[in-house]
Image: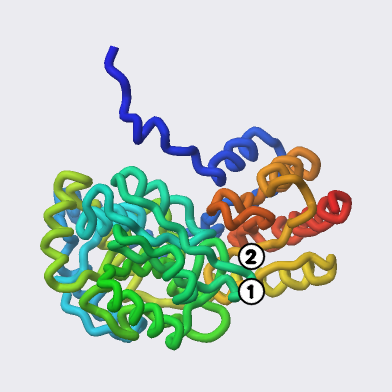
């Protein structure tokens, strides 16, 4: 009897997905574990997608994306991210996950090392594992503000390291990398001849200060910048993401799209054009709503004496649950069982997440605050 792939079979199940499945089986559960915008896609974007279907945008699209969308993204990159790029550097994929996967295929071979943040979005490790890369974690420590340092990167570096992945704003931490720190990290990448993948999927959801795109600081010849329409535009189900590549890499990434997913459906791409070129009022209203929730959740946690990282971007609050249970996973499961509140255990995001938990601010305000009150109440009893 033939056997399935050892790599695929051995891939761990997401720790976030474990809690999601338990939450689905818990009637009346308050869901604070998932990074899913609670807002509907703005109407003008939906109308553009509907119109595209009626107009016949139902055929295959170019591998790298519709030319008009790539041009519109290039305009956005200059206007929003301060980066001058040619449309030919833009490659559109079905969501940021596919974008990241293609980027890794473009610049790595099996056995190459990749520096990944810890804690971080678990799909980084999963994608790297499936491509037979050597995962090398650099720890984001509370005493460093949960930001990468050159010293920490140097500690994780090995002779096989070929790629450094950055995430700003961070999921799950909500931290932002500033211009000075990015310049230090880019100098480190140049010194060690590393490719840099910069995951900037939450670039439109910043509450304090400004988002700084990595490639706008320097190193545009070695930085691949990854973005998505999912978060800022509440378009998770439309599956449109994109990367901006150094010029010589874009044709390689485009070629790889054919055997992996061919192209993004054209109707979704037409909707993405409308997202960038249409009114931005709804998008700003969503950002402000997340900011208000951030402030309200921080106030509740402060009142309960619970330590946490007040996020500067994205829509997550990183909560300190150390000494509340033997493990953060145990804490999350007991919280769900006793209080019907679902949060993501910190270990779902890496070993350095032990003792912490992620609370998603994407939940509607009223149930979110009730969930945080239950979390605080349970935490006091567990201490």
The tag on residue 324 is none
Disc 2: which residue: 317
Looking at the image, residue 41 sits to the left or right of residue 268; the answer is right
- Crowd around label 1: few <14 · some 14–19 · many ≥20 (10 Å): few
Query: Residue 131: x percent and y percent?
Result: 29, 46
- Element type at mark 2: strand
Local SS, label 1: helix
Place of residue 52 in the rendered image (x, y in percent of width and height, measured from the top left): 24, 57
Q: Is residue 219 above or below residue 337?
A: below
Q: Residue at x 36, y 69 (%)?
A: 198
Give the crowd class for mark 2: few <14, some 14-19, many >=20 residues within 10 Å.
many
Give whichever of discs 1 and 2 has the lower sequence position. Answer: 1
In depth, the one of 279 and 196 nearer the eye is 196
In this rendering, the answer to whether 75 lies above or below 300 is below
Q: Is residue 34 left or right of residue 279?
A: right
Q: Identify whether 35 is placed above or below 27.
A: below
Disc number for residue 143 = 1
Query: Which of the 4 image quadrants contains residue 275?
Result: bottom left
- Work out how far the residue at label 1 is from the one at label 2, CA to CA, in angstroms: 17 Å
Residue drawn at point x = 72 percent, y = 71 percent: 298
Q: Residue at x 56, y 58 (%)?
A: 38
Residue at the location (32% across, 57% down)? Answer: 100
Residue 312 position within the rendered picture, expressed as x and y whole percent measured from the top left: 57, 76
Residue 371, image x and y in percent? 74, 54
Q: Are marks 1 and 2 in contact (CB under 8 Å)?
A: no
| Rendered-image quadrant of the N terminus | top left
The answer to which of 246 and 183 lies nearer the viewer is 183
């Amino acid at each position: 009897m033939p056997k399935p792939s050892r790599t695929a079979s051995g891939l761990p199940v997401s720790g976030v997905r474990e809690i999601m499945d338990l939450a689905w089986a818990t009637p009346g559960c308050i869901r604070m574990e998932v990074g899913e915008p609670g807002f509907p896609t703005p109407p003008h974007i939906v109308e553009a997608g509907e119109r595209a279907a009626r107009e016949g945008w139902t055929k295959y699209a170019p591998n790298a994306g519709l030319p008009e969308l790539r041009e519109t993204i290039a305009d956005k990159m200059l206007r929003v991210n301060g980066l001058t790029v040619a449309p030919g550097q833009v490659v559109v994929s079905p969501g940021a996950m596919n974008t990241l996967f293609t980027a890794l295929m473009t610049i790595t071979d099996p056995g190459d090392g990749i520096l990944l943040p810890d804690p971080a979005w678990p799909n980084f490790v999963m994608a790297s594992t499936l491509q037979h890369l050597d995962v090398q974690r650099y720890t984001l420590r509370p005493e460093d503000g949960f930001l990468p340092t050159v010293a920490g990167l140097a500690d994780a570096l090995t002779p096989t390291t070929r790629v450094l992945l950055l995430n700003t704003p961070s999921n799950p931490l909500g931290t932002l990398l500033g211009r000075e720190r990015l310049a230090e990290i880019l100098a480190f990448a140049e010194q060690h001849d590393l490719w840099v993948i910069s995951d900037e999927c939450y670039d439109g959801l910043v509450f304090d200060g400004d988002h700084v795109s990595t490639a706008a600081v320097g190193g545009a010849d070695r930085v691949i910048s990854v973005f998505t329409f999912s978060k800022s535009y509440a378009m998770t189900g439309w599956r449109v993401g994109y990367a901006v590549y150094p010029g010589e890499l874009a044709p390689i990434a485009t070629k790889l799209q054919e055997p992996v997913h061919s192209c993004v459906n054209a109707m979704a791409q037409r909707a993405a054009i409308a997202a960038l070129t249409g009114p931005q009022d709804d998008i700003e209203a969503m950002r402000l709503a997340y900011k208000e929730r951030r402030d309200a959740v921080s106030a509740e946690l402060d009142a309960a004496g619970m330590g946490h990282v007040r996020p500067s971007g994205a829509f997550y609050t990183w909560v300190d649950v150390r000494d509340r249970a033997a493990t953060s996973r145990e804490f999350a499961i007991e919280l769900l069982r006793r209080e019907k509140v679902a949060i993501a255990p910190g270990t779902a995001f890496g070993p350095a997440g032990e003792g912490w938990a992620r609370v998603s601010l994407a939940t509607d305000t009223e149930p979110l605050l009730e969930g945080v009150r239950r979390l605080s109440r349970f935490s006091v009893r567990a201490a």
